Amino acid sequence: MIDALSDDYLGSPEVAACFGAEASCAHMLAFEGALAEAQAELTLIPQAAAETIVACAGTLRPDLARLREATVAASNPAIPLVAALTAAVAESDKGAARYVHWGATSQDVLDSALMLAARTAIEHLDARLRRLEHGLATLADAHRATPMVARTLGQQAGPTTFGLKVAGWLNGLVAAHERLNALHARLPLQCGGASGTLAAFGDDAPAVAELLAARLGLAPSAPWHTERGIVRELAAAFADVCAAAGKPATDIVLAAQNEIGELAEAAAPGRGGSSAMPHKRNPVAAIAVVACARRAPGALATVYGCFDHWHERAAGAWHAEAPALAELATLAGGALAQLGRALDGLEVDSAAMRRHLEADLGLGMSEAVSMALAPALGRAAAQALVRQAVTSAREAQRPLGDVLAEMDAVGEHLDAAGLARALDPLAFLGASERFIDQALARAATLAGAPPPVSPIAAECSTSATAAGLPIADPHVEEEDDG
């Protein structure tokens, strides 16, 4: 993240913790314990040895400072952690220590741990998305008939409703949510051994991988050491959450401008002020969401820049992916948290929305009048006629309706009542009500689905606080093929 002072503002400590040192150790130790159990079930290692490994993996609390130091020399944290686990097992049963990490490789441990971390992060994001979607659905329904001006290319366009705008925000979040949760169910185990063949497991290799996947609650998969599609999908899904949150946040920032004043974040002591200007009321939560969303593409580019993994094991590419993926998940969590703050107590000035809709001489109804005239005149001729009226209205600074009422070519096809209907913003909202209903129904369907839950959530969330156990020399008794 940026720095210790901004991390909580532009990120999510809870999501960051899913990828933190303590959680990573817990995930890696869960892998080692599950591996030993699977191998013992297939009699590849003694049952007694597996029980000792599982017990030690469940109680080991490595000294994180020493683990970080050893990681610098070893090139990845799996090597010194496996060494520490081996040393702990040896204290209980020297013979069992030889079976720790049996036939696996560092990338198996780290990639599987990364999937476990991503799964937990998705569960955090799911809970936040559900709360936001419920709030947006309520807001959209409450304002389905609140008229406002639509803005295209930064200019006032025709009429819309604030409810439809919110429904658009809701659709974006729901779409990102659906993609994210679909990934949760298919996060794969990584288990390929030194060269991606699992040759060390012999004929039992497929069975070991299936049992290991089942114990960790991950999907069985062929080794994907250098086929990183799942990492790119996860990165894109996390970035998509940032983008989906960034859209309403950007709209809130724009609508909170003094010249517009249609929306405002809830006022509170110490919130939204300026260090220099006492009158300021900045939409600070929405601004934070925008900042998170703006940072996501850089981290996403890092992941996609690592697409060219060499041969059967890459040098540097998968090492770079993990921190970028963690950053994307953390940014997604931060964006959702801050969007929740922005929406909580959001002030909607419907009077300002109506004023802007009726401002600018009523020119925003030009399309409606054109379409009312088109059946009689044809689309091109109708637009040309209305364009002439718009020019006259602007030059004379007169309302468009007054100018149109004086044009014989208009009166021939629209009587006073017909022209009034064409100039009524509430009569030109099209299928907005239906689109709002569709957005609410889609959100309700997702809300009715059970939340994704890790099969081993309790086990994998075990705290791995330092307890002073030594980090063994990674070159003693435990070698890794890289």
Image (cartoon, grey):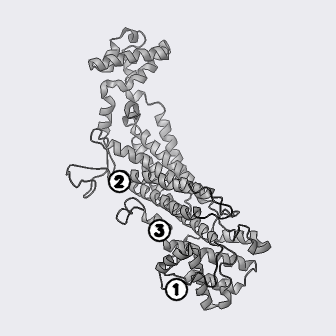
- Position of 421 relative to 126 (above/below): above
Give the side of residue 422 with respect to residue 98, left or right: left
Quote the CA–CA distance across marks 3 and 2.
22 Å
Identify which residue is drawn at 54% across, 59% down: 451
Q: Nearer the viewer, residue 434 or 279?
A: 279
Given residues 100 and 178, the one toward you in this image is: 100
The residue sitting at 44% across, 31% down in the picture is 429
Task: Identify residue for label 1.
Answer: 470
Q: Earlier in the sequence, mark 3 or mark 2?
A: 3
Q: Residues within 10 Å of mark 2 (few under 14, many from 20)?
A: many
Looking at the rendered structure, the kind of residue marked 3 is: Ala
Relative image position of residue 267 (x, y in whole percent)? 27, 53
Depth-wise, is mark 1 or mark 3 nearer the camera?
Answer: 1
**Residue at disc 2, secondary structure:** helix
The circle on residue 17 is 3
Residue 259 falls in which quadrant of the image? top left
Q: Label 1 near label 2: C-beta < 8 Å?
A: no
Label 3 close to label 2 by CB (< 8 Å): no
Residue 37, image x and y in percent? 68, 78
Q: Is residue 221 above or below residue 429?
A: below
Query: How many numbered callouts?
Result: 3
How many angstroms separate mark 1 from mark 3 (CA)? 23 Å
Q: Tell whether 304 sits left or right of 250.
A: right
Type of amino acid at the residue the image marks with label 2: Ala
Q: Which mark is residue 285?
A: 2
